[in-house]
Image (spheres, coloured by chain):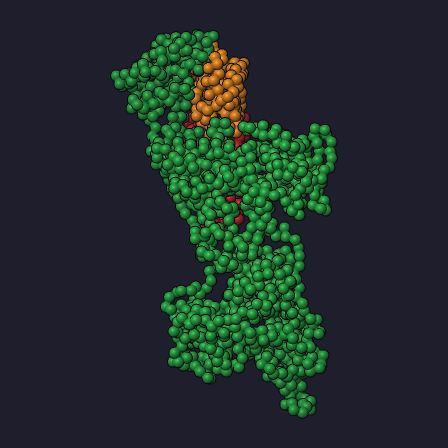
Chain colours: A green, B red, C orange
Amino acid sequence: MRAGVFICECGGNISGVVDVESLAGHARTLDGVVEVAVNQFMCGTEGRALIADAVEERGLDHVVIASCSPRFQGPTFERIARELKLGENAVAFANVREGCSFVHRDMPDKAQEKAKRIVEGAVARVRHQSDLPRQRTFLHRSVLVVGGGIAGMTAAEELSGAGLDVHLVEREQSLGGFMARLAKTFPTEDCAMCSLAPRLTSTAVDGHIHIHTLTEVDELTGPPGEFRVRLRHKPRYVSEACVGCGECIAVCPVKLPSHYDLGVCEQTAISRPFANAVPSTFAIEKKGWSPCKSACAVHTSAQGYIALVAEGRFEEAYRVASEPNPFPSVCGRICTALCESTCSRGEVDEPIAIAGIKRFVADTVGPTLPVQPAPVIHDDVVAVVGAGPAGLTCARDLAQLGYRVTVFEAQEVAGGMLRTGIPDYRLPHDVLQREIDQVLALGIDLRLGQRAGRDFTVDGLFDQGFKAVYLATGLQKSAEIELPGGDLEGVTRAVELLRELNLGGTPAVGDKVVVIGGGDVALDAARSVIRLQQQRGIDPDVTLVYRRTQVEMPANASELEEAREEGLKVEFLVQPVEILSESDDEDAAGPGQGPASRVTGIRLQRCKLGEPDASGRRQPVSVEGSEFELAADTVVFAVGQALVDDFAQGCEGLAIEGGQIRIDRETMMTTREGVFAGGDAAAAGFFTAIEAIAAGRRGAAAIHNYLRGERLLPVWNEVRDTARPSAEELDGIEIGQRVPMTMVDGLVRRADWAEVGKGYSAEEAVAEAKRCLNCAVCSDCGSCARACPSGAIDWDQRETTEEITVGAVILATGHRQFDAARKIPLGYGRHANVIDQGQLSRLLSAAGPTEGELFRPSDGAVPKRVFMLQCVGSRDVTSTGNAHCSAICCLFATLNASLIRQHYPDTEVTIGYTDLRAPGKAHEEYYRLVQERGVRYVRGRVGEILEEKDGSLRVHLEDTMTGRKHEEVFDLVVLSAGLEASDGTRDIARVAGVQTGAAGFIREDHPKLRPVDTQRTGMFVCGTAQGPKSIPDSIAQAKAAAARAIAMLSSGFTMTAAQVAASDPAVCIGCGVCETVCPQKAVVLTTGADAHSIVDPSICRGCGICAAECPTGAIQLGGFSDAEVLAEATLR
Amino acid sequence: MPLTNRGHEILGRLPTARPRTSSGIGCEIVRHEELCVGCGTCAKNCPSGASRRGDTFDVWQLLDAPAGSRRGALGAALRRIARREPAGPIEVPPRVTVYRTIVYDAELCLGCGTCARNCPADAIEALAPKLSMTGDATPTLPTTGGGAATSSATPNAAAPTLAGAASGEVTP
Amino acid sequence: MTAERSNHDRTTAEPSGSTHVTGDRSIVAFCCRECAYAAADASANARTSLPPSVRLVLVPCTGRVSPLHLVTALAEGADGVMVAGCLLGQCHYREGNFNAVDRVAFVQRLLESVGVEPERCRMFTMSAGEPPKFVAAVKEMDRVIGALPPLQRHDTSMSEDAGDAAEPAKAAVRTRAATPAKAAAATRGAA
């Protein structure tokens, strides 16, 4: 090396104590030193020239400056070295001023010796100093600002003014933040919204600022200057066609506590927080599908019609209920109602009577609405075989799509199993017929008495000109009975028995009847037999025998209950073995009866449940030796239904497998081109009415797609996520009771065929509907879409993601009020008239829910005595974990107290405080002014707040000035809840990888020197996200953060620092210790056989922790390698 | 403890062999602590927890470390000022990561050899397992090499206790 | 490196090594740029008088200082080493000084285990705005080290004839008996 040592006299500061010439002489003796010079001011122009000349003439490659502290003139000399083309890291410093001459003035001999050592150290060090690389990194001239409150908007405006692009991201539906909720601001009592509104407008129109509301930051990676951000945009369900008229709000039936008004009043599911909201588009809060909607086979918006019923809007409710289902009166009576089994209210007390409410609406409104014939749009004619629920629903949908439909029905009445299977007392025939007629009134041609295979064939239909055929013939016969004695007289089948009954006949049943089966059909048969027996004048004697237990029974639980009330006897876990007759006794045969063929009884065997079979149901296993007999003269089998396949004749190519018509699940088409099927005949395992209706809808969509030649309609609905209230929300619901449905006493009602369930009255239906929890918030009722004059409601919106790259990030995610309910003795959340300052602000706001009138929550009265309690959730580490003072609450309370006093001179306001803190500019003066306005300040602590009967509050107050405890009664209590980091702040801290401190606030890089930087280079913080502060302080910090970002990005590129760590792959063993210890996450390990560490120089801060830990010395800190540090320390 | 594939292979060849009574069958692990650099790779990858970062440090590992290594440099410096031999291991404060003695619990060791395979400092050897051919417990099976995953050790150096066993010879 | 330096590979009764300032002990102070060195500069600007034994070595953060640096400094002539950094929790680089605290404690234990006074290595914290703390730290270190004898250093060769046979402070430390395996391994590993 060829080093030059340049000794500064520093105008006597050094030379006054140290003999610089002697020092120079010593320096000349050091190895590697080829030039030594002394100057009075080495940092001046003369000194610079000296160095420059020496470098050039003597060919110096390293420079040692013996002068003041490197912390002062270090950058000067380093710049000189760079200009002299010596590179980075060519200079070593011998601090002989602060390090020697200044501190050893009284011992010049020792100072001299020490100065020699210091120079020796620098020369030893510089020997090991080599050039350090710097990388040029590109900086995107754009900034991500997270948080659209006053701080975020201020920062955005500053950044935009500097010509940078800004992405302003806000998770709520509008910009504004907490300031938008304030009434006025201290100390000037300016209207908050008046100050904010111009800022909102200017942000909205600023071309540089891209506003993203209802947006989350999901990912934030990459180096400073090139941060990669993944944004997630949540759907508003309202397009930009929205003109902000508010017609939708008037019709939305769902109410929830208002987010913007902090729960002081309600909002609707569709809303806009305030008039000046940016953007001004409304938004719908929609968490997904309610569980009832998800569970329903046709995805009826049950929450929708229930919400409308709760408001007494029955006609609208009917429209919602009948849109997907042409048989609401029917289903309201007989549906299996999976919606009710999954109803969230069932977690609290009992599920909502969803079916019962539908029945009420359909019975009340259905008959009143005239049905117009549907216009025919298409030439194609479609045939439907079977006028059951599947067939008629398919016909309805096709008619509404503009097709001419002809329905062929084998029986002389329409309705399928709804008509021939379900008795009057459950589903009156006239109710069913009314809904059938409403379907037919669309212009559907119904041909009764036409049986496929006998009166026409499917092939023939095509010949006649039909373009598609829908087979919905159901399962019209009983399954075969394989039991000894199954052919005896007195053995009947439930399906046939019920059909005979429902078509006007009187099936013959004996005096002692056993019904075998556990489904709805078995119960229908059993209860019908009870009535038949009753009508014959005998005491009903019917026993139902089922081989599993009640839990496994497919029938509705309520059906079984009602049947028992009507006298049905039930034997569970019993299987039939044989049907008995007096076969061997010829003499027993009576007149008119065939010899030896009459049922006399049934042998049964008890069983128990064994292992589940393929369907998952536990199989009954006979119990040995448990056979017994029941006397019976009639045995009714209700053990399943089977396909009557006469339609298959004359339908070429139709495949029937396993007793079902085979269909393609996607197209609903059978194996015969143009022939579709659904309902019980092609059910894929679901044999209920509602599933048949759903099948009919799918069939119609499939046929429409087929006939039009393109996929115009989805056959299967896109299923959305199911939304439910959280466990916490459910906990808060008061336990109630389902409104019971009026029912005639069982023993009375079995005397006739009148409908047993009387249905809800209007009051009952409304009361029951009000129990609904509105699981999905938006209930999918569609009222807003109908009311919107500009058609702005858009259900097709979905969550989308967007990736952007920015150069810097500013976090301005704000705070939340401490949840005062956590301080249990204060009664927040339990006593109606205990609120917090934020809520009070909403009440005092001129544009707020009460238009600025202070109406207390419980009764709307104007309070005469108001108490405000300070330090709720602040300065309270023991019970809340928050040790900090929230900085603004004393003034917030003072402000609100002042507003109350000015508006209501007769109202007394007392503020109970711990210390009254008014630190900012003009704050103390304001406090004094408000005291003069008559606000009473009591230095006191509150133990407990109790509620009186009239809603007023008894406050147990300890006056710490006098030391006395007393009670006072107030009409309204306002808690000054402290400031904590908002949920958004916690979330973004996690995503961005920045540290947080106490109460979750984002930790600044240095508490004094770098208040708006974070530990991650390129990420800044401002506003209440960093800590509690007033609005002017938030604005100041926002401008500071913006200035930092502007400074960082102004040139568009930067050089990485020289003093960063670097890892030598040849020495690195890939142990990963460096990666673990780096506080900046600047080191990563490559993978594979030759794994080694790599440092990102744009992230590395140059602390050197990694270098100190490295077991091999592979990773070193530029400018502070082991060699350099040790050389200086050991003088070698 | 279930047999490893290697264990099965060995038993397949030598049906009357009985494994050692320590928990696993497999290689014998020999750790050369003076070569250890304290990176913790063995501990990180050990499937059974037999190797783990300890809370103490055997100072001898500094004094015996090879010259030219980082520990060696620290050891050499310590040697120069040392007045006596270290009494015992010292406790290590939590943020000191590499100056730790790896605790090796032979009872937990499976003999899988992962530590030896991955040790970047070649401080661990995995020797072929020693099995008894007869009923007695003294291992006598000679090996032809280092077992599953040794480095370039010479065979004899890798099997220090095989007194008298020539390569390939089976002693009854 | 220079002819004037005494050969500190041999034990002497005098303070060893050329790192000392005549008659005084030699103390090396690793000071972090942000706090300790700044405090040092500030106290110097106030012309506070300091003992000449302490020589400053600038590091960006005390987290850079490793046990290797501390022990090597002692081995190469310092009678004491101190690490001066930011107050805990206020490190400019977030947590470097926490690492330094642990490493200093570790070195103290190392020293103690080989019979060297652990107080020869110490850590002090201060903020840039607390120059008196820096002064106090330096004076404290100077006092403690001054009360101890100069740190003796030995030749590290294992042969018997290094240095004066009469020296009581002869190297008593040997390597442990090498097994053949370890010898072989040592040969391998020294590459």
Residue C84 in picture, x, y percent from top left: 49, 22
Count how many numbered circles sit on residues in the image. 0
Which residue is rendered at x = 55% and y = 52% of the image? A268
Q: Is residue A529 left or right of residue B165?
A: right
Please, is residue A917 above or below residue A803 in the view? above
Q: Is residue A833 left or right of residue C60?
A: right
Residue A984 in picture, x, y percent from top left: 51, 42
User: Does the rendering let one see residue B24?
Assistant: no
Residue A700 in picture, x, y percent from top left: 45, 69
Please, is residue A519 above or below residue A261 in the view? below
**Image quadrant in which you'd find residue A115:** top left
Location of the N terminus of chain A (image quadrant): top left
Which residue is rendered at x = 44% and y = 76% of the image? A383
Please, is residue A1086 above or below residue A372 in the view? above
Closer to us: A1013 or A363: A363
Q: Is residue A701 left or right of residue A304?
A: left
Which residue is rendered at x = 42% and y = 14% of the image? A97
User: Does the rendering let one see residue A1119?
Assistant: yes
Please, is residue C11 above or below residue A890 in the view? above
Closer to us: C53 or B81: C53
Residue A856 in picture, x, y percent from top left: 64, 44
Location of the C terminus of chain A (image quadrant): top left
Which residue is rendered at x = 67% and y = 42% of the image? A863
**Image quadrant in which you'd find residue A382:** bottom left
